Image (cartoon, coloured by chain):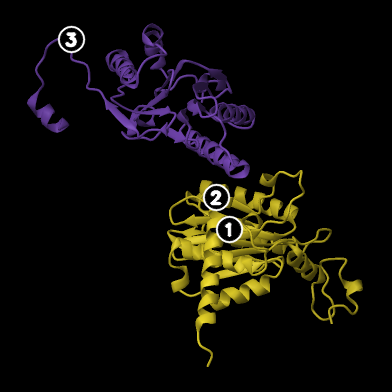
Chain colours: A purple, B yellow
Amino acid sequence: KSLSYFAAGRTTMEYLIGMKFNNFVLLAHDNNGGRDILVMKQDQQKFFILDEYAGMVVSGEAGDTVYFSEFIQKNVVLYRIRNGYSMSPSAAANYTRHELAEALRQKVNIVNLLLGGYDKTSNTPSLYFMDYLGTLAEVPYGSHGYGSYFTYSLLDRLHRPDMTQVEAEDLLLKCVVELQKRFAINLPSFSYYFVDQNGFGEKKVLTVPPPPLTTARAFHPAAVEVME
Amino acid sequence: MADVGAGKYDSALTVFSPDGHLFQVEYAQEAVKKGSTAVAVRGKDTVVLAVEKRALAKLQDARTVRKICSLDDHVCLAFAGLTADARVLVNKSRLECQSHRLTVEDPVTVEYITRYVAKVCQRYTQRSGARPFGVSFLVVGFDQGIPKLYQTEPAGTYHEWKANATGRNAKTVREFLEKYYTEESIQTRDEAIILAVRGLLEVVQSGSKNIELAIMEKGKKIEFLDTDQIEKYIQHIEKVREEEAEKKKKKPHP
């Protein structure tokens, strides 16, 4: 690889987004799974639950991501079995960062993630931004990938901590529509998760149509048939 | 037979005695016999663990004396013997449970984790400079909905059981279980609990504060019963006992 290590994992074509609100956290990831310019899967799982009240969405080098995430997952569960109570989201985040930092000078480990959770003892939601260099930041909202360049401005303008889940979904939709409009890589489908005092909800899927062409044109019928 | 000449042959563990004994292993089994009693019953859809709770010092916090531990969400165990030795083995096993999940994407079977514990125990019977573990475990859990119970010993052996006891007076409890364990007597959750409690009451002073009880039902996590719940079962057992005694009295003598 001609890229230096520092540049290697800086941006990927995958997209992760997390938003924190007063009573819940929203985590989302794109559903594309593949390498470089090839899409191998359209339903790729990038979410890993860490024991009921904390979970993370992960992006980066294929293989590294799953290996690292499963390792963290099992160690978080082991903590609960050993100690009788779960790691809080903050503890899980700091532990994850510790592992990222240790791995940094041992091997190439390109894993970027957003960890969101709900702390049952203090009844507060939290969202943590982490990258492959071992950066850890507690944030109100965060994003990974090229797509983040397009959506931070939307979040800056529109995110409010007192939003409801419906409003949060709507804000996610706005981000995703913006990606479809302005981001050259096609990311049509996203999975998103809410975590609140009841733990994680079911996975929800958001699929966005491609933006309408600005120059009106009829589709070639044969092409439409092939596509369908 | 075990006493004569034993002194010369029990210091270095890798050595057999002339008559084929591994004395340190046997002494470890003696340590187990000194530990407080633990009973396990395998029911139809339930597994029950009951242990004797030794009387605590007044100033001691009861919660810190836990003789029933869970190894994973679907496996747990009770032990008799040296608590510190048990702690080391339980810790290793908990790690192995997660390690297994990580490498093969599947939870351990009860037999696998029992075999793992037994393997560690055996290793220490063949190692110089270290003594065997003075613990015997009763490992319970579910393998795809099927309840299982295994017992391990300091020697590093393990066997599957339908019901068993270990620790002080284990023989008495086992004889009781052999007499009263039938397919009908363990059909429901309550019946399995009652059998385990009755077994323990054979050797333990009656009273819910002397018994720690945990059950695991198919598909559910381990459940610790509190003192009040245990008391209800004890009262039920005593009531049944009284009724049987009454019946015997009323029967006309032949």
B55, above or below B16, in the image: above
Q: Position of residue B89 (x, y in %)?
A: 68, 54
Dot 3, how many residues are within 10 Å of its Cα: few (below 14), some (14-19), or many (20+)?
few
Secondary structure of the residue carrying tag 3 is loop
Identify which amino acid the numbered label 2 is placed on.
Asp
Q: Residue at x 66, y 67 (%)?
A: B166
In the image shown, does B207 or B172 lie closer to the viewer? Answer: B207
Disc 3 and disc 1 on one polypeptide chain: no
List the residue tagged with mark 1.
Answer: B113
CA gap between label 3 and label 1 equals 63 Å
Identify which amino acid the numbered label 3 is placed on.
Thr
List the residue tagged with mark 2.
Answer: B72
Q: Are marks 1 and 2 in contact (CB under 8 Å)?
A: yes
Secondary structure of the residue carrying tag 1 is helix
Disc 1 and disc 2 on one polypeptide chain: yes
| Chain ID, mark 2 | B
